[in-house]
C-alpha cells in the first residue's frame, strides 16, 4: 500500500492519509470544503461542495487518475434539502456510466462542514 498526498488538497486532521493506493485501487478519504491554501471553509453549501470536488480532483491527479476512473462515491450531507444542488454540481464532474453512489444525511461533520465526499477510483 502507498499513501497519496498532495499539498493542493487540505492537510488531514487526524491519523489517516488523504488517499491510499493498492492493487490499482485508490481509496480517497472524505474531503470537506476547505480551501487548501487558506485553510478557510467555504461560506455556503455550494462553495463547500465545489471545494470538495476540487480537493478530490487534486488527489486523483496526484495519483495519476481523474474522475473518469471513479467507481464509487460516498456523500455525507447535513441537510438533504441540498440534495438537488449537490446533484447538479455532481453532474459536472461525472458522466455515464456514473459511479455507484450513496448520499446520506448526517447529524454533523468535522469542522461543522455541510458536506463530505469520499471515493474509490480504479486504474
Image (spheres, rainbow, N blue to C red):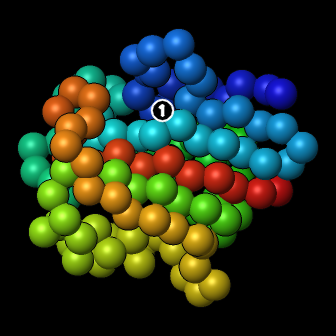
Q: Residue at x 19, y 65 (%)?
A: 80
**Left or right of 26 in this view: 81:** left
SS under mark 1: loop
Residue 79 drawn at (x, y percent) = 15, 58
Residue at the outermost right position: 23
Query: 51 or 111, which lies in front?
Result: 111
Q: Quadrant of residue 33?
A: top left
According to the picture, the residue beneath numbered tag 1 turns out to be 8
User: Looking at the rendering, which quadrant does residue 19 occupy?
Assistant: top right
Residue at 46%, 40% (x, y): give it: 30
The image quadrant where one finds the N terminus is: top right
Q: Is residue 116 above or below residue 90?
A: above
Furthest-bottom residue in this view: 96
In percent of width and height, residue 78 lies at: 19, 51
| x, y percent for residue 105 | 26, 56
* 98 on left or right of 26: left
**Left or right: residue 59 compared with residue 33:** right
Decide if residue 51 is in sight here.
no
Residue 57 placement, left or right of 24: left
Which of the image's four quarters has the C terminus? bottom right
**Residue at horizontal 69%, vertical 55%?**
121
Residue 58 vertical position relative to residue 11 in the rendered view, above or below? below
- Crowd around label 1: few <14 · some 14–19 · many ≥20 (10 Å): some
Answer yes or no: is residue 63 visible: yes
Reply above or below: 107 against 91.
above
Amino acid at each position: 500500500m502507498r499513501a497519496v498526498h498532495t499539498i493542493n488538497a487540505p492537510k488531514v486532521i487526524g491519523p489517516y492519509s488523504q488517499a491510499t493506493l493498492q492493487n490499482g485501487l485508490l481509496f480517497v478519504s472524505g474531503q470537506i470544503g476547505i480551501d487548501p491554501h487558506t485553510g478557510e471553509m467555504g461560506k455556503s453549501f455550494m462553495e463547500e461542495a465545489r471545494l470538495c470536488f476540487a480537493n478530490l480532483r487534486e488527489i486523483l491527479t496526484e495519483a495519476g487518475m481523474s474522475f473518469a476512473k471513479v467507481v464509487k462515491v460516498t456523500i455525507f450531507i447535513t441537510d438533504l434539502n441540498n440534495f438537488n444542488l449537490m446533484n447538479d454540481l455532481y453532474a459536472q464532474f461525472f458522466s455515464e456510466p456514473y459511479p455507484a453512489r450513496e448520499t446520506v444525511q448526517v447529524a454533523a461533520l468535522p469542522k461543522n462542514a455541510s458536506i463530505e465526499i469520499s471515493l474509490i477510483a480504479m486504474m
